[in-house]
Image (tube, rainbow, N blue to C red):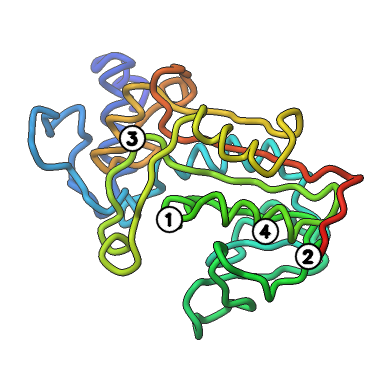
Amino acid sequence: MKTLVRRLMGDECYQQAQVTLLHELGGVGLDWRWGNSLRRVHPIRRDFAWQSGRPIDRSYTEDCFLLAHRADIRGRALEIGDDRYTRKFGGERVIISDILHVNPGMGGSTIQADLADAKHIPSNRYDCAILTFTLQFIFDVPAALATLERILCPGGVLLVIVPGISQIARYDMDNWGEFWRFTSLSARRLFEQVFQAEDITVTTYGNVLASLASLHGLHSTELTTAELDHWDRDYELVIGIRAVKRPDHRTVA
């Protein structure tokens, strides 16, 4: 029956039907390419696709950036907000997992600190630190990066994801502020203030379709793998930065 339906509909139409009927979980009810014109002033969804699937920017974060650098997640690890990526990609390589949150009393957090002013966190402590979609909420980004470099052990690795093209996270904006969007060049310049240029790798992900779909709150399964994987240097939807603290560097506490 499936083979017959596919022949009658054609491969492209059949694929669209699969996306619409199988992957639209609790969302708008129709695949955006069928029933929702993009000639509109309001987005299809405003929740970054969290209610109906996995956001496109998280697809790049998990399936591309963190997967490529999973070997760096080891030893003493620090993550912001929760430790899901530490657990998912670090596994048994992680000996100690700390969770930092700026607000006191947040469930699961082990450290309360503002990265822009966190003198109470010991220097040379962590083998890895993970920050996904965090720096845009910190006004003093250079100070935060200086803290992160200080608390890394010599040879430790900082893995960071920042948004290039993104809607405003309204809850965060209203509660503690959202200040920045980045480019690959601004990210590199900021990191070069505290790390050596040769110890920094900056990778961008995205294209015009992925950016448009992300702004409309579509989830990753509403695009094909080929559509997600296509790279266009002029549409930096997500920017990943890997920075290593020099093994011979000794921070003065």
Quadrant of the rendering where the C terminus is positioned: bottom right
In the image, what residue type sits under mark 1? Answer: Phe
Spatial CA distance of label 4 from label 2 is: 20 Å
Residue 51 in the figure: left or right of residue 74: left
Q: Nearer the viewer, mark 3 or mark 4?
A: 4
User: Which residue does the numbered mark 2 point to in the structure image?
Assistant: 123
Number of other residues with Cα within 10 Å of mark 1, as a class: few under 14, some 14 to 19, many 20 or more:
some
User: Which residue does the numbered mark 3 point to in the structure image?
Assistant: 222
Badge 1 or badge 2: first in the primary sequence? 2
Number of other residues with Cα within 10 Å of mark 3, as a class: few under 14, some 14 to 19, many 20 or more:
many
Q: Position of residue 92 (x, y in %)?
A: 81, 60
User: Which residue does the numbered mark 4 point to in the structure image?
Assistant: 86
Badge 4 or badge 2: first in the primary sequence? 4
In the image, what residue type sits under mark 2? Answer: Ser
Decide: marks 1, 4 in contact (CB < 8 A)? no
Between 216 and 238, the one lying in front of the other is 238
Secondary structure, mark 2, is loop
Secondary structure, mark 3, is helix
Spatial CA distance of label 2 from label 3 is: 44 Å
User: Which residue does the numbered mark 1 point to in the structure image?
Assistant: 139
